[in-house]
Image (cartoon, coloured by chain):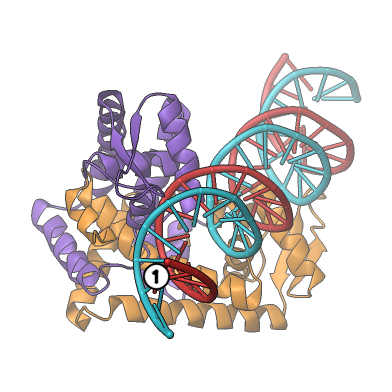
Chain colours: A purple, B orange, C red, D cyan
Amino acid sequence: MISPSDFLEKVEFRDAALLSFVTSAIIVPAYDAVKRDLGITRSEYLLLMALSHYPVLTAQDVSRLSGRPRNSISRAVHRMLAVGHLARDPDPTDARQARLSITETGRALHRQIAERIRVYQEEVLSPLTEQERETVVNLLTKVVAQRPSAGAAEL
Amino acid sequence: MISPSDFLEKVEFRDAALLSFVTSAIIVPAYDAVKRDLGITRSEYLLLMALSHYPVLTAQDVSRLSGRPRNSISRAVHRMLAVGHLARDPDPTDARQARLSITETGRALHRQIAERIRVYQEEVLSPLTEQERETVVNLLTKVVAQRPSAGAAEL
DNA sequence: GCAATATTGTTCCACTTGGAACGATATATG
DNA sequence: CATATATCGTTCCAAGTGGAACAATATTGC
């Protein structure tokens, strides 16, 4: 039987493939679990996540921050408004945009989602010692520092 | 202005977010360029990639190897057959499955795609020294070794 | 101050995706 | 040997996705 990880050693861009494999091992199951159990799509939790770290954002801000297109965020905003996880106020200085903020129930949901993803992260990265993990984080941080505005995390 | 990378420092699962950010910075633009310039979808190049490293595979093999569902691979097989990048022969010992192999034009296309992705990889990882990069690769390899059959690379 | 241009958020649409069910074939069980 | 179960590849369908065009509003340049 051929396993997916055998494939990694053969591929022409092995380093990217390794990064992708590890990322997927965390993100994909976590994302599936969140969608299945909480009914939240990716755009929706990116929206909640952005708003739980910044008190007020426009939809455009969230789009740029998350790397999702504006129409996806627009849909997410409507769904989250409908279930009361978001508040939207017109911006008094610019009638085009609206000021979005997260509600307490939205924040609670975000905490649930984040905790769930964190559990997957810990499990996948458990083969590394504390120090090894810190090394990886430092080196990846160095990489990110060179492209602060690149495509955004495919979280 | 808030940049996506600022977000990384705040998120609850920063390590996964870092991995995801770096992976996306390579994979997403590379994938977009391949689709735009060569008209090849992700399932299709995963198919070509698998077959350029294993002489004969069934669609099921490719599905397991790539982590893509069987119907996606099925579609990819038909498209690649239509343009002559693939050959399909009935398996004499099992009429359910077919033996897939890549043609010379398929192999050439694969080379183009792989080279293109490799260029993105080199550009994004260029902030690391040779040694640092080796360190990252070793540590990620250690992580992968613990879950050889996990979800497969989201390449 | 006014016309040209840019930006925000939305709707529309074409496309990709992956789960589920299906027919055909193979394997296991009694 | 017959029936139940599993597997392969396919088709169907519902859902998510993102580009493009759009109306409303803001900003810029003359």
* Residue A79 place in picture, x, y as percent: 47, 32
Q: Is residue B111 visible?
A: yes
Mark 1 residue crowding within 10 angstroms, few (<14) / some (14–19) / many (20+): many
Left or right of A131 in this view: A35: right
Q: Quadrant of residue A121?
A: top left
Query: In percent of the image, x 70 and y 60: which residue is there?
Result: B76
A83 or D5, which lies in front? Answer: A83
Q: SS class of the residue under badge 1? A: helix
Q: Is residue A41 visible?
A: no
Figure check: A122 above or below A10: above
* Residue B61 place in picture, x, y as percent: 62, 55
Left or right of B50 in this view: A28: left
A142 or A102, which lies in front? Answer: A102
* Residue A14 place in picture, x, y as percent: 39, 72
Figure check: A118 above or below B58: above
Q: Which residue is mark 1?
A: B26
What is the three-letter code of the residue carrying label 1? Answer: Ile
The N terminus of chain A is located in which quarter? bottom right
Labels in figure, total: 1
Q: Residue furthest left?
A: A131
